[in-house]
Image (spheres, grey):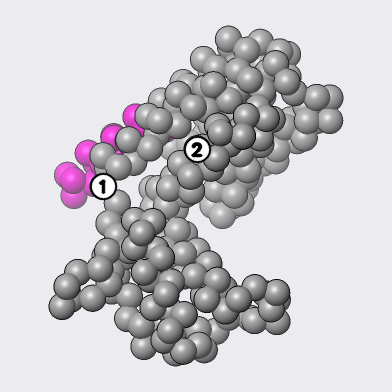
Amino acid sequence: MINFNLQNHKPLREIVYEELKRQIMVGEILPGTRMMEVELADEMGVSRTPVREAIRKMEKEGLVTIEPRRGAYASDISVQEMVDVLEVRQDLEGMAAALAAKKISDGQKSELRELSDRYGKAVESGDIKEIIDLDEEFHKNIVGISENKTLIQMVSKLQELALRFRYMYYEDFSRFQNQPAEHHLITEAIISGDADAARRLAEEHLSHLKEFVETEAENLTKH
Protein backbone atom coordinates (compact mmCIF):
# COMPACT_ATOMS: atom_id res chain seq x y z
CA MET A 1 0.00 0.00 0.00
CA ILE A 2 1.34 3.42 -0.95
CA ASN A 3 1.80 6.03 1.77
CA PHE A 4 -0.20 8.80 0.12
CA ASN A 5 0.40 11.28 2.95
CA LEU A 6 4.03 11.60 1.88
CA GLN A 7 3.11 12.30 -1.74
CA ASN A 8 -0.21 14.14 -1.55
CA HIS A 9 1.12 17.01 -3.66
CA LYS A 10 1.11 14.76 -6.73
CA PRO A 11 -1.85 13.44 -8.76
CA LEU A 12 -2.78 9.85 -7.91
CA ARG A 13 -1.98 8.60 -11.42
CA GLU A 14 1.54 10.03 -11.13
CA ILE A 15 2.11 8.43 -7.72
CA VAL A 16 0.99 5.02 -9.01
CA TYR A 17 3.10 5.37 -12.15
CA GLU A 18 6.23 6.31 -10.19
CA GLU A 19 5.78 3.45 -7.73
CA LEU A 20 5.23 0.78 -10.40
CA LYS A 21 8.13 2.14 -12.42
CA ARG A 22 10.35 2.04 -9.34
CA GLN A 23 9.39 -1.59 -8.70
CA ILE A 24 10.34 -2.53 -12.27
CA MET A 25 13.57 -0.53 -12.21
CA VAL A 26 14.88 -2.06 -8.97
CA GLY A 27 13.77 -5.59 -9.78
CA GLU A 28 10.87 -5.92 -7.35
CA ILE A 29 8.80 -6.66 -10.45
CA LEU A 30 11.01 -9.00 -12.46
CA PRO A 31 11.20 -9.09 -16.28
CA GLY A 32 8.45 -11.29 -17.67
CA THR A 33 6.12 -10.74 -14.71
CA ARG A 34 2.49 -10.30 -15.73
CA MET A 35 1.11 -6.89 -14.71
CA MET A 36 -2.35 -7.78 -13.39
CA GLU A 37 -4.38 -4.59 -13.02
CA VAL A 38 -6.72 -5.93 -10.34
CA GLU A 39 -3.94 -7.38 -8.18
CA LEU A 40 -1.73 -4.31 -8.50
CA ALA A 41 -4.64 -2.01 -7.69
CA ASP A 42 -5.49 -4.06 -4.58
CA GLU A 43 -1.86 -4.09 -3.43
CA MET A 44 -1.57 -0.32 -3.83
CA GLY A 45 -5.00 0.49 -2.44
CA VAL A 46 -6.20 2.29 -5.56
CA SER A 47 -8.68 1.74 -8.37
CA ARG A 48 -7.74 0.02 -11.62
CA THR A 49 -7.78 3.26 -13.65
CA PRO A 50 -4.47 4.80 -12.47
CA VAL A 51 -2.84 1.36 -12.71
CA ARG A 52 -4.05 0.97 -16.29
CA GLU A 53 -2.79 4.47 -17.15
CA ALA A 54 0.59 3.71 -15.59
CA ILE A 55 0.95 0.48 -17.55
CA ARG A 56 0.16 2.24 -20.83
CA LYS A 57 2.67 4.98 -20.04
CA MET A 58 5.37 2.44 -19.20
CA GLU A 59 4.65 0.60 -22.45
CA LYS A 60 5.65 3.76 -24.34
CA GLU A 61 8.89 3.83 -22.33
CA GLY A 62 9.66 0.20 -23.15
CA LEU A 63 9.32 -0.98 -19.55
CA VAL A 64 6.10 -2.92 -20.21
CA THR A 65 5.06 -5.08 -23.15
CA ILE A 66 1.35 -5.44 -23.91
CA GLU A 67 0.41 -8.55 -25.89
CA PRO A 68 -3.06 -8.91 -27.48
CA ARG A 69 -5.29 -11.34 -25.54
CA ARG A 70 -2.44 -12.11 -23.13
CA GLY A 71 -2.07 -8.91 -21.15
CA ALA A 72 0.80 -6.73 -19.97
CA TYR A 73 4.22 -7.96 -18.84
CA ALA A 74 7.32 -6.30 -17.46
CA SER A 75 9.65 -6.14 -20.46
CA ASP A 76 12.62 -8.44 -20.71
CA ILE A 77 16.11 -6.99 -20.94
CA SER A 78 18.48 -8.48 -23.45
CA VAL A 79 22.25 -8.48 -23.12
CA GLN A 80 22.45 -6.61 -26.41
CA GLU A 81 20.23 -3.85 -25.03
CA MET A 82 22.57 -3.48 -22.06
CA VAL A 83 25.60 -3.37 -24.31
CA ASP A 84 23.92 -0.82 -26.59
CA VAL A 85 23.19 1.48 -23.66
CA LEU A 86 26.71 1.18 -22.25
CA GLU A 87 28.29 1.87 -25.65
CA VAL A 88 26.40 5.15 -25.93
CA ARG A 89 27.07 6.03 -22.31
CA GLN A 90 30.76 5.41 -22.92
CA ASP A 91 30.96 8.17 -25.52
CA LEU A 92 28.61 10.64 -23.86
CA GLU A 93 29.99 10.29 -20.35
CA GLY A 94 33.52 10.55 -21.69
CA MET A 95 32.50 13.88 -23.18
CA ALA A 96 30.84 14.90 -19.92
CA ALA A 97 33.97 14.13 -17.92
CA ALA A 98 36.10 16.20 -20.30
CA LEU A 99 33.70 19.16 -20.03
CA ALA A 100 33.54 18.76 -16.26
CA ALA A 101 37.33 18.98 -16.03
CA LYS A 102 37.16 22.38 -17.75
CA LYS A 103 34.21 23.79 -15.77
CA ILE A 104 34.34 22.32 -12.26
CA SER A 105 34.22 24.83 -9.37
CA ASP A 106 35.95 24.50 -6.01
CA GLY A 107 32.66 23.58 -4.33
CA GLN A 108 31.95 20.96 -6.95
CA LYS A 109 35.43 19.50 -6.49
CA SER A 110 34.71 18.87 -2.81
CA GLU A 111 31.31 17.34 -3.58
CA LEU A 112 32.68 15.03 -6.27
CA ARG A 113 35.52 13.85 -4.06
CA GLU A 114 33.09 13.21 -1.21
CA LEU A 115 30.84 11.14 -3.50
CA SER A 116 33.83 9.10 -4.64
CA ASP A 117 34.87 8.46 -1.02
CA ARG A 118 31.34 7.52 0.06
CA TYR A 119 31.08 5.10 -2.84
CA GLY A 120 34.31 3.41 -1.79
CA LYS A 121 33.02 2.98 1.76
CA ALA A 122 29.74 1.53 0.45
CA VAL A 123 31.65 -1.08 -1.56
CA GLU A 124 33.68 -1.96 1.55
CA SER A 125 30.47 -2.42 3.56
CA GLY A 126 28.81 -4.51 0.81
CA ASP A 127 25.55 -2.52 0.99
CA ILE A 128 24.19 -3.20 -2.51
CA LYS A 129 21.48 -0.52 -2.47
CA GLU A 130 23.93 2.09 -1.21
CA ILE A 131 26.48 1.02 -3.82
CA ILE A 132 23.97 1.35 -6.65
CA ASP A 133 22.57 4.67 -5.39
CA LEU A 134 26.00 6.25 -4.98
CA ASP A 135 27.25 4.87 -8.29
CA GLU A 136 24.31 6.50 -10.05
CA GLU A 137 24.78 9.74 -8.10
CA PHE A 138 28.49 9.86 -8.93
CA HIS A 139 27.87 9.60 -12.67
CA LYS A 140 24.97 12.08 -12.57
CA ASN A 141 27.12 14.55 -10.67
CA ILE A 142 29.83 14.55 -13.34
CA VAL A 143 27.30 15.02 -16.14
CA GLY A 144 25.71 17.87 -14.17
CA ILE A 145 29.05 19.63 -13.81
CA SER A 146 29.36 19.65 -17.62
CA GLU A 147 26.53 22.25 -17.70
CA ASN A 148 25.52 20.97 -21.13
CA LYS A 149 21.73 20.73 -21.02
CA THR A 150 21.42 18.52 -24.10
CA LEU A 151 24.03 16.13 -22.75
CA ILE A 152 22.37 16.05 -19.33
CA GLN A 153 19.00 15.13 -20.87
CA MET A 154 20.46 12.40 -23.08
CA VAL A 155 22.56 10.80 -20.37
CA SER A 156 19.73 10.99 -17.84
CA LYS A 157 17.60 8.72 -20.03
CA LEU A 158 20.48 6.30 -20.56
CA GLN A 159 21.29 6.16 -16.85
CA GLU A 160 17.66 5.39 -16.09
CA LEU A 161 17.76 2.46 -18.49
CA ALA A 162 21.02 1.29 -16.93
CA LEU A 163 19.46 1.28 -13.47
CA ARG A 164 17.62 -1.95 -14.29
CA PHE A 165 20.92 -3.51 -15.35
CA ARG A 166 22.54 -2.62 -12.05
CA TYR A 167 19.89 -4.31 -9.94
CA MET A 168 19.79 -7.37 -12.18
CA TYR A 169 23.52 -7.99 -12.59
CA TYR A 170 25.31 -6.24 -9.75
CA GLU A 171 24.02 -8.27 -6.80
CA ASP A 172 27.40 -9.93 -6.39
CA PHE A 173 29.59 -6.87 -6.12
CA SER A 174 32.74 -8.85 -5.39
CA ARG A 175 33.52 -8.53 -9.10
CA PHE A 176 33.50 -4.75 -8.78
CA GLN A 177 36.12 -4.19 -6.12
CA ASN A 178 38.16 -2.17 -8.62
CA GLN A 179 35.37 0.33 -9.24
CA PRO A 180 36.19 2.67 -6.33
CA ALA A 181 39.73 2.99 -7.69
CA GLU A 182 38.34 3.82 -11.15
CA HIS A 183 35.98 6.42 -9.66
CA HIS A 184 38.91 7.90 -7.75
CA LEU A 185 41.05 8.22 -10.90
CA ILE A 186 38.19 9.88 -12.81
CA THR A 187 37.61 12.25 -9.90
CA GLU A 188 41.24 13.30 -9.64
CA ALA A 189 41.54 13.85 -13.40
CA ILE A 190 38.47 16.10 -13.38
CA ILE A 191 39.61 18.01 -10.29
CA SER A 192 43.07 18.54 -11.76
CA GLY A 193 41.53 19.94 -14.95
CA ASP A 194 42.98 17.24 -17.21
CA ALA A 195 40.18 16.95 -19.76
CA ASP A 196 41.93 14.35 -21.93
CA ALA A 197 42.63 12.03 -19.00
CA ALA A 198 39.12 12.52 -17.62
CA ARG A 199 37.57 11.52 -20.96
CA ARG A 200 39.85 8.50 -21.36
CA LEU A 201 39.29 7.22 -17.80
CA ALA A 202 35.50 7.70 -17.98
CA GLU A 203 35.36 5.84 -21.29
CA GLU A 204 37.51 3.00 -19.94
CA HIS A 205 35.28 2.76 -16.88
CA LEU A 206 32.14 2.26 -18.99
CA SER A 207 34.03 -0.12 -21.26
CA HIS A 208 34.86 -2.30 -18.26
CA LEU A 209 31.17 -2.36 -17.28
CA LYS A 210 30.25 -3.39 -20.82
CA GLU A 211 32.82 -6.18 -20.76
CA PHE A 212 31.44 -7.38 -17.43
CA VAL A 213 27.87 -7.55 -18.77
CA GLU A 214 29.03 -9.55 -21.79
CA THR A 215 31.10 -11.94 -19.62
CA GLU A 216 28.33 -12.34 -17.06
CA ALA A 217 25.85 -13.16 -19.81
CA GLU A 218 28.14 -15.88 -21.11
CA ASN A 219 28.43 -17.34 -17.61
CA LEU A 220 24.66 -17.34 -17.13
CA THR A 221 24.08 -19.18 -20.41
CA LYS A 222 26.42 -21.97 -19.25
CA HIS A 223 24.24 -22.78 -16.23
Asked whether residue 86 is in view, the answer is: yes
Q: Which amino acid, by three-letter code, is at mark 2?
A: Met
Q: Where is residue 208, by image quadrant?
A: top left
Which of pointers 2 and 1 lies earlier in the amino acid sequence?
1
| SS under mark 2 | helix
* Viewer-side residue, 60 vs 112: 60
Tag in front: 2 or 1: 2
Q: Is residue 23 left or right of residue 36?
A: right
Task: Name the residue beneath numbered marker 2.
Answer: 154
Q: Give the range drawn in magenta.
A: 209-223
Asked whether residue 212 is in view, the answer is: no
| Residue 14 pos. (x, y %) | 55, 71
Q: Which amino acid, by three-letter code, is at mark 1?
A: Ser
| Residue 102 pos. (x, y %) | 70, 16
Q: Say above or below: 1 vs 171.
A: below
Task: Name the residue beneath numbered marker 1.
Answer: 78
Q: Say above or below: 49 vs 115.
A: below
Total marks shown come to 2
What residue occupies the far right of the structure in this picture? Answer: 106
| Residue 10 pos. (x, y %) | 65, 73
Distance CA(mark 2)–CA(mark 1): 21 Å
